[in-house]
Image: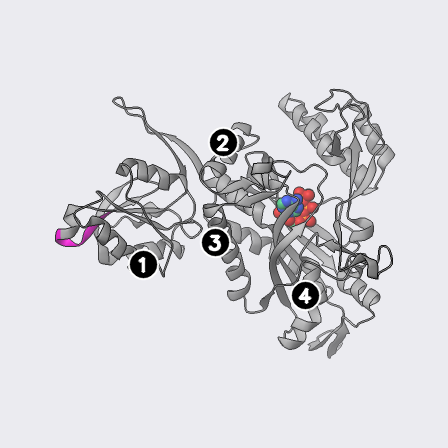
Amino acid sequence: MANDSKKFQDIISHCKEYGFIFPSSEIYDGLQAVYDYGQWGSELKKNIKDYWWKSMTQLQENIVGIDAAIFMHPTTWKASGHVDNFNDPMIDNKDSKKRYRVDHLIEAHAEQMVANNRQDEADGLIAEMEKLLAKDDFPGLKKLIETYNIKCGISGTSNWTDVRQFNLMFSTEFGSSSSSEEGDNIVYLRPETAQGIFVNFLNVQKTGRMKIPFGIAQIGKAFRNEIVARQFIFRMREFEQMEMQFFIRPGTQKEWYEHWKQERLKWHLSLGTDSKNYRFHDHIKLAHYADAACDIEFDFPIGFKELEGIHSRTDFDLKNHQEFSKKKMQYFDNDIDPATGKAYGNYIPFVIETSIGLDRMFLSVISNAYEEQDLSTPEKQDSRVVLKLPPRLAPIKMAVLPLVKKDGLPEIARQIIDDCKSHFHCFFEEKDTIGKRYRRMDAIGTPFCVTVDQQTKEDSTVTIRHRDSMQQERIAIADLKRIVLEAISGTTTNTSNFLITN
Ligand code: ATP
């Protein structure tokens, strides 16, 4: 899909036109890198969340979920390293005043080189950049930008400032400022949900009688003052994360890291997306807390980019919280260590983290589902935009459409909906030609359209239309619920597999 910017723009317009995503406070011209999910977007997002939550908690014997607050004691962020280390190197162009994240500026230049058949040079540039980033060598990074004569896309000049660090955390004031010393009441909007899990590690372990290895999962908002927030919902300043911290015995991190890499990839593939759309990218520059890390990258219309991170976080977080809070973060392991014949005893667990952005997951799902189809025949020009969403994620599962607005057909349609709506999301529509109604349902990814016509009154059958194949067949009303429920429960991702042949 590499860098299909037309497709990307088409998806952004489609999301707006069909009620998936709107720019935030649009009547005031929006707020940069903040978005609102509309009527169908919020349904799709919720279905993704539910699918993740179920896979990571209900289907796992040893993982439980929590919902921690966004605000946390400010010392949390000292202990986690975010106050001192949650920085990105950035550089400003003195002429355009535009600010760039250094890695993004260099990567964009490398992409241009690749487009101009200079792949080897581009690889060299990226390798050099990664080396300098790993050493936090800012003068070296500036020199690299100058050596490759990288220019600002707006001013066209290479009149750069020095490379500097920029902290990505948002801060605000807590309570009444007059009652405290200056700076005392600063709190941060959490830049990741993980710390809410770490500070609750013992609460959950003790009250849940959890035995290592076990995990704690959480879905929630995170906030980052991204230097260059662009690319629609790929990089936002307010976004949602779905994270799981898996607590393990020290020394077992390699095998659990591999386990979670494979488990998470399997989860993505379980949605029916082609495996060629995913790849692992191992980190060279490791975050301050990690001893191994990789990304699961997805082939977005803007190229392969990070969708999810898998991090081996060692005991960094729990150890630091123990040090800063002066509260023990230890676990007593009474299993017998075969090497010593004695219980493993007290230790601070190591952690494997899986961390995925819900909004990025949304973007990957919609990018994969979006298709423009030319349906023209020699007689007639025709086309459609269809979202081939996995049925379990589709905002609406079944639309029920009376062929005409009279003769009792709307009443039968409503009766069908009443019978199904507590099981899955249904939609009633009686306006416009049936063809137009089908097209609108295709555009929001509804897997099944059911048409009620005169014959329905005679034999209680309806026409069911399958979104992907557009094939139609006559079935008994009594079979509808089962067909849709089977599709949602994921026996297949292709609705046409449900064509009933007898
Ligand atoms: P990037 O390198 O793209 O900035 P990151 O490595 O900082 O991402 P993590 O800190 O590992 O990201 O966060 C875990 C996940 O949260 C990412 O894989 C991504 O899906 C999501 N995420 C991170 N930052 C953003 C953002 N600004 N907007 C949307 N999603 C984000």
Tell me: residue 468, above or below residue 485: above
> In the orientation shown, which residue stands out farthest toward the left?
458
For the residues carrying marks 3 and 4, which lies nearer the camera in this image? Answer: 3
Mark 2 element type: helix
Give coordinates of residue 158: x percent, y percent: 79, 22
Mark 1: secondary structure: helix
Tell me if I can see residue 502 in this picture. Answer: no
Q: Marks 2 and 4, how far apart in space?
A: 42 Å
Residue marked by disc 4? 247
Colour scheme of this structure image? one colour
Whole-angstrom CA distance, mark 1 to mark 2, is 34 Å
Q: Residues within 10 Å of mark 3 (few under 14, many from 20)?
A: some
**Residue range of the region highlighted in magenta in the rendering:** 458-463
- Which is nearer the eye, 348 or 65? 65
Q: Disc 2 vs disc 4: Cβ atoms closer than 8 Å?
A: no
Q: CA distance from mark 1 to mark 4?
A: 42 Å
Nearest to N terminus: mark 2 or mark 4: 2
Residue 394 within the magenta-colored segment of the rendering: no
Mark 3 in CB contact with mark 4 (< 8 angstroms): no
Nearer-N-terminus badge (1/3) = 3
Task: Kindly report which numbered mark, 1 or 4, lies closer to the viewer in this rendering.
Answer: 1
Q: Which residue is mark 2?
A: 10
Lower sequence index among marks 3 and 4: 3
Residue under circle 1?
420
In-image side of 299 versus 314 (left or right): left
Amino acid type at image mark 4 = Phe
Q: Report the side of 132 relative to 402 (left or right).
A: right
